[in-house]
Image (spheres, rainbow, N blue to C red):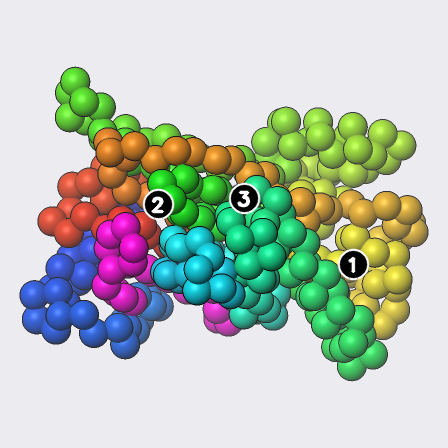
Amino acid sequence: MLSRLINFLQKCWQRTLDRHMHTGSDTTGWQDGLLWYKDSGQHLIGDFSMAVVQANNLLEDQSQIESGSLSLLDSGPYGTFVGVYDGHGGPETSRYINDHLFQNLKRFAAEQNSMSVDVIQNAFQATEEGFISVVAKEWSMKPQLAAVGSCCLVGVICNGTLYIANLGDSRAVLGRVVRETGQVLAIQLSAEHNASIESVRQELHSMHPDDSQIVVLKHNVWRVKGLIQVSRSVGDVYLKKAEFNREPLYAKFRLREPIKKPILSADPSISVLQLQPHDKFLIFASDGLWEHLSNQEAVDIVQNQPHHVRSVTRES
């Protein structure tokens, strides 16, 4: 399985090289079986490519890259924005994030006329609140929207500073050259929120000391309330607000006990890094990649390809 996945990804990046050789900067993308791929050329600091492997009949994931002004003001900060949105329960939340998160980021950056951790936190909060409003509006007709959510991994590069913000279990990894040896080492930049991680379970227990069932081992998989693996997300409002933990939401989603405080969080973990000349490329991917590859294996694949992409997203 691992060798097949590696060969698959190598073909994806080889296709990038072929497109550069034959069709230049065409950005239409293409589909090949369950693969969706797009090579959109250059952003402000280099090249990028994107790939999606569709694991479900309905594609629930979204990804985007934006390059240029990160503010509504032309005089505002300039840089590059990368987003990977790994949906679950349906495609609505990831699509909403794809349509609104970057716009919210630009709005708050315009107000501050700079990029910062506060700008990113405010953009995430506004996106979460916006989707909750959609759920409330559609509640009588589409109550299942309350059980739709998405992990959300974002990278923002501005003035040589890299901001990584994450909700859920997607991951950002940096490929950095060791000057003495020339080896490219993998450095994980994001913190993950999955109940399989002991520190996440401890965090949940500390936040819900009176709930012995806040994390349940079900079919050898740790799940929050026995329902979901991630402890942070956009959406999943049935696990955040009591008014959505009731009929007409399907019984399989409803908790028996009333929700006294949010079980899941939409507060991202954010890290900040000053990029250096020996920082070579970034990989942004959902857990579908990291379940099969270690950080170093993924970095080695990118490093060993003829066309060295600057950033890659792969979702499943």
Task: Say if mark 1 contacts mark 2, CB within 8 Å.
Answer: no
* Residue indicated by mark 1: 238
Compare marks 1 and 2 and give the one earlier in the sequence: 1
Give the magenta range.
38-65
Q: Residues within 10 Å of mark 1 (few under 14, many from 20)?
A: many
* Residue indicated by mark 3: 116
* Residue indicated by mark 2: 283
- 207 sits left or right of 56 in the view: right
- 286 sits left or right of 132 in the view: left
Q: Is residue 202 magenta?
A: no
Visible residue check, residue 102: no
Residue 208: quarter of image? top right
Q: Is residue 206 above or below residue 32?
A: above
Please state which of the two labelled residues, at mark 1 or mark 3, is closer to the viewer: 3
Q: Residues within 10 Å of mark 3 (few under 14, many from 20)?
A: some
Task: Say if mark 1 contacts mark 3, CB within 8 Å.
Answer: no
* Position of residue 232 measured from the top left corner of the image (x, y, whole percent): 65, 46
- 285 sits left or right of 191 in the view: left
Q: Residue at 15% across / 52% down in the picture? A: 307
Visible residue check, residue 205: yes
Amino acid carrying mark 3 in the image = Ser
Compare marks 2 and 3 and give the one earlier in the sequence: 3
Q: CA distance from mark 2 to mark 3?
A: 22 Å
Image quarter (top left, top right, bottom left or bottom right) of the C terminus: bottom left
Q: Secondary structure at mark 1?
A: helix
Q: CA distance from mark 1 to mark 2?
A: 32 Å
